[in-house]
Image (cartoon, rainbow, N blue to C red):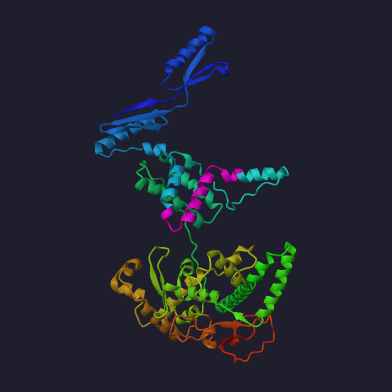
Amino acid sequence: MSSIVNKSKWIVTVKRRPDLTRAFPHYKGAEAKAYKQQLLSEDKLVAEIARGPLKLFVRISTCGRPSQYLRVHSYEEAEALDTTTRADELRGVPVNTTAARRTTTAQLIERYIREECVDHKGEDVEVCSLKGMLEDSRGELIRARQAFKDATDRGENPKPVKARRQARTELEWLHLPFEEVRSAHLTAFKNARLKQVKPATVKREMDLLSAVIHKAIDSWDYVIAKNPMKGAKRPIVNNGRDRRLQGDEQERLFRSARREDLIRSRDLAIEALLIEPREQAKKARNKSEGQRFLKRARHRALKQLRRGYSISPLYESLIAFLLESAPRRSEALALRWRDVNFEDETAFFPDTKNSRSRTVPVQRFTMDLLKSLPRSEERVFALTEGEFTGAWKRLAERAGLRERDRANKEKCLKDFHVHDLRHEGLSRISEVGHATNPYFNVFDLQAISGHLDIASLARYINPKPKALTKRLNASFAEAGISPDGGYRANNARIRSTRSSGGPTGVVIAFPDVLHRHVRSSRAPSALSNHPVQGSAPATKV
């Protein structure tokens, strides 16, 4: 059975005497009448009793289940809810929305951060985005920026606001009861957010909110009348990229990568020579004397480097690996030496974006480069995400693949991104397969098997990585394609015994900027045509 309970407060008022106004809870009507009688008998004041803002609850009692109170805003809504509840009981589908009415969406987001995000690969990004939504729903960022502006106008020196993002709007509904959230709230947020960021960003944020809502409904048993995500359409995203390397862009990219390797190796060599002088400079009498000592030590180190130093082709091998084997950037940077099989010419990725491990073929061009890298660390490419991002900006600008002036957005759209190497690599493999591969390609197999999508077909295809390596090498050799624009093939940059997985030798460079006249008793090797700007002929020992 169900009943309607009016929990509106009793309010006693006296005309022109607001100081005598008092409010009583809905269950203290007798006290409100007593207060009215007191005013009349003692002060001869005529008071009035009225109910406050309408606060109705429907009390639903079911045999064998705890009673629940559902708040409504009118008697008509209470009667409709009573009818719906009786119909659900007759059908044997009782609905209890008490938990959804006592919990806000903001509380659900906080629980999602605590319990679910910790198991996700993109935990940092998800937590940052969800916490930003909670802060913006409370207006914290807007108030902080306004306080900074007011303090600056007063001539103070306030602490700057670190957040660089735009404050989200139309998120006040996060503090409503979960049962009261509607599709209109999400649509208003989407429309306001589209004025600030691109549709892809809005879609990702709506996907996060959808994950929270579905987790609350499906796993946490929060019952609501209708899922608000069903009526909220996500924005259409059309951000696919078809940027390919054209003309001599690939050759310029590898030339720039070699230049970056030269600079990096030179800086590392200088730092290695300055380790002991830095310790001695700490014992100087004052800071100025220590700086002068380090300056003289650096000058001596530069003189010593004129006799040559070791160059590690780190960036050249990394870009070649991204271009030829088409892994994701995170997968390449996490690659370990123990996961590289030099005999089979393959690389194993145990932890990928979709949590599925895989083994990819590595062409012999890149494998020869990997053999020349030092094994001082566990990872093959000993770089952080930030280090590689900064290096990519420099070498892309040097190669003319990235605009130095970022003001013109139309020009920036023509930039070549790191992830475009993955697109380029997969496109090349597909093109080579169509041109020279005697085996069936995936489209032929799809026509034979009758599968409607490639995902289903992939369950039946398990090629061996070693066989893929042989087919790749044969196909590229037959097509006459060299991954770095023909430099390694024509100039025989790397010589490999192809017997063991260790490095084949140490590369010694003589930068022209340090010493323009180098005498060497050794005969010049295949490295004498090193195309890096500002470098003299090199030898290999």
* Viewer-closest of 434 and 403: 403
On the question of residue 399 being in view, the answer is no
* Viewer-closest of 76 and 416: 416
Find the magenta span and give its range: 118-143
Residue 122 in the image: above or below residue 69: below
Expressed as whole percent of the image width and height from the top left, the position of residue 61 reads 30, 30
**Residue drawn at x 43%, y 19% as measured from the top left:** 28
User: How many numbered discs sit on the rendered protein?
Assistant: 0
**Residue drawn at x 36%, y 74% as measured from the top left:** 442
Q: Main secondary structure of the magenta part?
A: helix
Q: In which quadrant is the N terminus drawn?
A: top left
- In screen coordinates, is 217 left or right of 151? left
Residue 146 in the image: above or below residue 450: above
* Viewer-closest of 76 and 135: 135
Residue 296 in the image: above or below residue 51: below
Please identify the quarter of the rendering in which residue 183 is found.
top left
On the question of residue 306 being in view, the answer is yes
Q: In which quadrant is the C terminus drawn?
A: bottom right
- In screen coordinates, is 222 left or right of 45? left
Expressed as whole percent of the image width and height from the top left, the position of residue 430 reads 42, 76
- In screen coordinates, is 467 left or right of 531? left
Q: Is residue 120 magenta?
A: yes
Q: Is residue 496 magenta?
A: no
Expressed as whole percent of the image width and height from the top left, the position of residue 477 reads 44, 85
Please identify the quarter of the rendering in which residue 472 is found.
bottom left
- In screen coordinates, is 248 left or right of 61? right
Expressed as whole percent of the image width and height from the top left, the position of residue 161 reads 62, 49
**Residue drawn at x 39%, y 79% as measured from the top left:** 344
